[in-house]
Image (cartoon, rainbow, N blue to C red):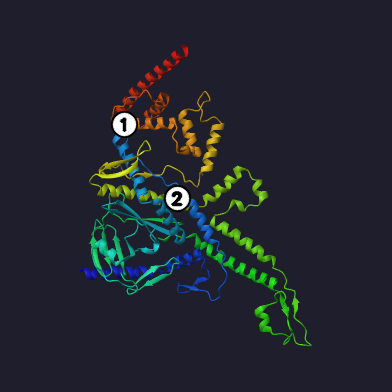
């Protein structure tokens, strides 16, 4: 197929997918508007978002609910680890290196910010996407794609891997297109989504540089194309057509560089569902009740008057009202304006308002413990309050597990891309086993498998306050003490760290220094280096740390022998120091 025909075919495919997705886009626009407080809108029968004829006051409860959920999602623990492919030392070290590379790559890409952006899009629209690609200079690059940029071939596919093809449509400045692909394209009219969800038309003559639409169509491997196909069209130019560039799927196969994250899975739909869709009917009803209630209150404060026809200037009275000190002139012989009983605000309004507020909490699963009445709050035990928090967090488990699964898949893509492209030594700054920052040179073949796991629970399930309380309870029951009721130096350092004082006033105590030194010596002996104890070492701490390391299942026979020899030297030095201390006492 000629380049021009292929460009037309890709753009035609894109237009067809966009038409099929319009109903989904309308929901996204409505969600974004309600989140931003533009709630006097509705969907017409054609699926377009239109403004209501009658403007009403808005009392936005959706925004604080979503902001609370985002704050909770920011505490989700997404730390990953890599399981070794085997029990030998080489596999264990490769798995440790892989975990460090993942952590360093996420840090370099400022993944905390990216995760917050993805969570925000998922809460607004129900879906967000990560895009993991390779850059020869920077290595692995991670970006967040809002769902408006993603066009699947099947809107009912259960996952990205189930698609046959997917189009990533994005607007680029024409200068950026030239820098990326070396192709000059003409600016064109494009639709850019604004912050309120409405597409903004950017005409080619409104900007000095101009923009153009770039379409990346990824096709899955097939019988005719075993390595898949990637076609990139910028404006009216074909800039790339070839096989899929990344071996990023399971089983060393080529796949799509996209990872999906959903707020709530929607069966039979590729795109997820946003909680905002469930809250919109409640928000409409709440706005209506509030506006009617305020109308009643306005009549109560302004008053209702009966006026005899022709007795006063009605227009002036309507405009200025009965302000204090006003002189009302009425026609001689007629009756002056008489105040009427305005009634009172019906109790049903207050009851309905309370019911709607409770429905907000019931649907969203987000409540504020401080909203409980003072008597109810003070009569609750700490255990009861913790149960309330646990139940509230449990409502978000589906979303938090989707967040953690997305991070785990991103980590797999990172390892697979490094294995594919890091054929020469690459230098990466990582956190060493001792906690110090160090630079490591590696090649992709030195990395372990892609069995990425998450061995920690979400921070939402176990808050810092809960962990501190747990540590104090363990200490109270003596579970952290030895048979003599004493807490070892190692446990004492860990307890201080878990209580949040591991780096008290940024000063390292002597125990922490000796423990870090012992950890470095363990790593050196595992690498085959000969390590001799120093007379300045805290021998009891070193013996405890080396013994714990030697008891691990991943220690080889050579390393075990080296550690045993090293520990014997520590014991000799410890015995000599104790004898010297006894002699000093006698003298």
- Above-or-below relation of 326 to 273: below
- Residue drawn 55% across the image and 49% down it: 391
Which of discs 2 and 1 lies nearer the camera? The answer is 1
In this rendering, position of residue 553 left or right of residue 137: right
Nearest the viewer among 296 and 307 is 307
In this rendering, position of residue 348 left or right of residue 79: right
Nearest the viewer among 114 and 418 is 114
Q: What is the secondary structure assignment of the residue under circle 1?
A: helix
- Above-or-below relation of 534 to 27: above
Which residue is outermost to the right?
A: 333
Q: Position of residue 56 (x, y in %)?
A: 57, 71
Q: Position of residue 194 (x, y in %)?
A: 42, 67
| Residue 214 can be seen in this image | yes
User: Residue 260 bears which disc, if any?
Assistant: none
Which residue in the structure is indicated by mark 1?
Answer: 524
- Above-or-below relation of 315 to 277: below
Which residue in the structure is indicated by mark 2?
Answer: 401
* Circles 2 and 1: CB atoms closer than 8 Å: no
| Residue 552 can be seen in this image | no
* Quadrant in which the N terminus appears: bottom left
In this rendering, position of residue 11 left or right of residue 62: left
């Amino acid at each position: 197929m000629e380049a021009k025909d292929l460009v037309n075919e890709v753009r035609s495919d894109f237009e067809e997918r966009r038409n099929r997705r319009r109903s989904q886009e309308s929901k996204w626009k409505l969600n974004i508007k309600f989140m931003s407080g533009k709630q006097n809108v509705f969907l017409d029968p054609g699926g377009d978002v239109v403004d209501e004829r009658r403007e009403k006051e808005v009392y936005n409860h959706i925004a604080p609910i979503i902001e609370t959920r985002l704050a909770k999602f920011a505490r989700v623990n997404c730390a990953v680890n890599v399981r070794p492919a085997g029990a030998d030392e080489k596999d264990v070290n490769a798995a440790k290196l892989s975990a460090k590379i993942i952590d360093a790559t996420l840090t370099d890409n400022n993944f905390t910010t990216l995760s917050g952006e993805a969570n925000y899009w998922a809460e607004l629209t129900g879906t967000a996407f990560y895009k993991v690609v390779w850059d020869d200079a920077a290595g692995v690059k991670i970006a967040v794609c809002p769902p408006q940029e993603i066009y699947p071939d099947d809107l009912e596919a259960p996952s990205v891997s189930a698609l046959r093809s997917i189009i990533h449509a994005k607007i680029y400045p024409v200068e950026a297109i030239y820098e990326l692909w070396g192709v000059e394209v003409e600016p064109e009219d494009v639709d850019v989504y604004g912050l309120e969800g409405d597409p903004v038309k950017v005409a080619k003559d409104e900007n000095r540089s101009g923009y153009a639409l770039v379409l990346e169509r990824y096709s899955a491997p097939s019988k005719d194309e075993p390595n898949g196909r990637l076609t990139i069209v910028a404006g009216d130019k074909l800039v790339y057509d070839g096989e899929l560039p990344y071996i990023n799927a399971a089983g060393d196969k080529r796949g799509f560089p996209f990872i999906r994250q959903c707020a709530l899975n929607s069966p039979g739909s590729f795109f997820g569902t946003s909680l905002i869709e469930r809250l919109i009917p409640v928000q409409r009803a709440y706005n209506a009740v509030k506006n009617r209630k305020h109308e009643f209150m306005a009549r109560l404060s302004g008053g209702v008057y009966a006026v005899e026809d022709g007795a006063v200037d009605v227009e002036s009275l309507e405009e200025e009202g009965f302000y204090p000190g006003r002189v009302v002139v009425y026609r001689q012989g007629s009756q002056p304006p008489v105040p009427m009983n305005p009634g009172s605000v019906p109790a049903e309004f207050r009851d309905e308002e309370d019911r709607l507020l409770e429905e907000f909490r019931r649907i969203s699963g987000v409540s504020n413990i401080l909203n409980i009445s003072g008597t109810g709050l003070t009569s609750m035990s700490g255990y009861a309050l913790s149960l309330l928090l646990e139940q509230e967090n449990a409502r978000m488990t589906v979303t938090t597990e989707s967040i953690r699964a997305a991070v785990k898949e991103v980590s797999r893509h990172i390892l697979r891309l490094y294995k594919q492209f890091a054929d020469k030594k690459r230098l990466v700054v990582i956190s060493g086993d001792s906690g110090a920052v160090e630079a490591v040179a590696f090649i992709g073949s030195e990395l372990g498998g892609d069995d990425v796991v998450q061995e920690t629970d979400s921070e939402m399930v176990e808050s810092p306050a809960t962990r501190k309380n747990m540590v104090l309870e363990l200490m109270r029951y003596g579970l952290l003490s030895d048979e003599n009721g004493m807490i070892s130096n190692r446990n004492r350092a860990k307890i201080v760290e878990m209580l949040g004082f591991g780096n008290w006033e940024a000063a390292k105590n002597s125990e922490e220094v000796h423990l870090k030194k012992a950890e470095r010596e363990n790593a050196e002996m595992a690498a085959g280096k000969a390590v001799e104890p120093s007379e300045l070492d805290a021998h009891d701490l070193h013996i405890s740390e080396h013994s714990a390391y030697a008891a691990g299942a991943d220690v080889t026979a050579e390393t075990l022998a080296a550690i045993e020899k090293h520990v014997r030297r520590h014991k000799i030095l410890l015995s000599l120091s104790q004898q010297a201390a006894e002699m000093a006492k006698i003298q």
